[in-house]
Image (cartoon, coloured by chain):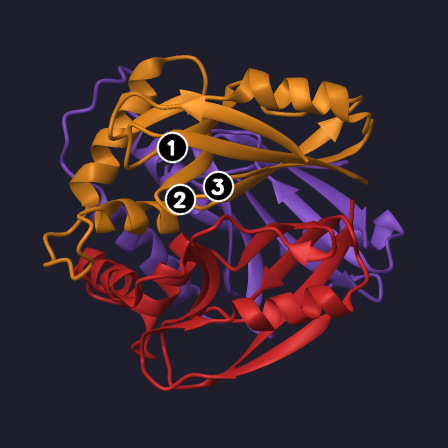
Chain colours: A orange, B purple, C red
Amino acid sequence: MDVIEVATQRRRQLVDITSFVQRSVAAGEVPEGMCHVFIPHTTAAVLINENADPDVGDDILAALAAMLPGVPWKHAEGNSDAHVMATLVGASVLVPIADGDLALGRWQGVYLLELDGPRKREVWVTCLRA
Amino acid sequence: MDVIEVATQRRRQLVDITSFVQRSVAAGEVPEGMCHVFIPHTTAAVLINENADPDVGDDILAALAAMLPGVPWKHAEGNSDAHVMATLVGASVLVPIADGDLALGRWQGVYLLELDGPRKREVWVTCLRA
Amino acid sequence: MDVIEVATQRRRQLVDITSFVQRSVAAGEVPEGMCHVFIPHTTAAVLINENADPDVGDDILAALAAMLPGVPWKHAEGNSDAHVMATLVGASVLVPIADGDLALGRWQGVYLLELDGPRKREVWVTCLRA
């Protein structure tokens, strides 16, 4: 397992971690298989989405925030919204490895979704042989 | 990796791809393991849900559309809603393989979720040995 | 594949299944790899979130319910809301196994999300070698 450390700058932020994941795959010596990208946190998530226009990431962040309901939160830390969004987006993605490289679609990148930053976050990357 | 090609007909649509995935598993010669179903696109997704009453799929499509907030989108292509929904539903599912067959629950099917069609889409299917 | 049986008590409920999954991993004899936790149902889901303050779980349940739109459902069984939430949260999680144990983050637990209970549910746990 490879550990990537990411320092986020804002409360909510998308961080492109594709090149870090690609480096892990290149070092992993798995020619054909799967790459598992896992967030060991409960107020952050990982997702795959467009790598071309950064406006897409801004729109995703704005929409997720606007979808949150105005319920009275019980949890006293003030970050229940982050737990809810992390639950919906998910703690891991699984991407094929082909010819020793991450096999993403043309417009796909892998992103850490910070939901309660700024913080230091870890991303755990594991390569599985097919 | 097996590539399934799907031509969608509408902007938003659920396409049952269970039988295509089952065919890939049957050809994959993995008796026990996992089947990974991956969408290499950023405005489509893959999900598991009910295979019996098509009204369930219609209700899922209607609810996802109604949950979208009325935020002003920055991305100029007019399909940010599709990126948001694809982020929430996810780019892959992972289903057990048992006795060389896809091990789904009795009411479960695997669906491509088109969010910005009509288009030609690919689905990448990979079998992993346990 | 290991089958965990869970009897839920309420319509919507989070059930901590972490210790059951850990027991499956301990029995699975996979020192390094992945643990797949799968729900073979279409009105329940599985998620990873905070294991410390139960208020977080209550907030997640309240928020998911409040996010549901008031669309007229076509499906006659009266549980389309459960299908929609199950679609958004997802039917499986994949967690690393390290040193023969489930490798979760410090605050993470694995939860069955009941969305149309009370019912008897199954959870299918499979260990994959890295």
Question: Measured along the vertical axis of the image, is residue A42 above or below residue B38?
Answer: below
The reply to whether residue B104 is visible in this rendering is no
Report whether B45 appears left or right of A118: right
Q: Which mark is residue A113?
A: 1
N-terminal-most mark, 1 or 2: 2
What chain is tagged by disc 3? Answer: B
Query: Disc 1 and disc 2: Cα gap in Å?
Result: 9 Å
Q: Mark 2 or mark 3, which is nearer to you?
A: 2
Q: Amino acid at mark 1?
A: Leu
Residue found at x 22% / y 58%: C63
Q: Position of residue B117 (x, y in %)?
A: 42, 33
Q: Position of residue C109 (x, y in %)?
A: 47, 60
Query: Disc 2 and disc 3: Cα gap in Å?
Result: 13 Å
State the residue in front, B89 or A9: A9
Q: Amino acid at mark 3?
A: Ala
Q: Position of residue A59 (x, y in %)?
A: 26, 26
Check if mark 1's residue and mark 2's residue have beta carbons within 8 Å.
yes
Are callouts 2 and 3 both on one chain?
no
Residue found at x 34% / y 30%: A119
Check if mark 1's residue and mark 3's residue have beta carbons within 8 Å.
no
Q: Mark 1 or mark 3, which is nearer to you?
A: 1
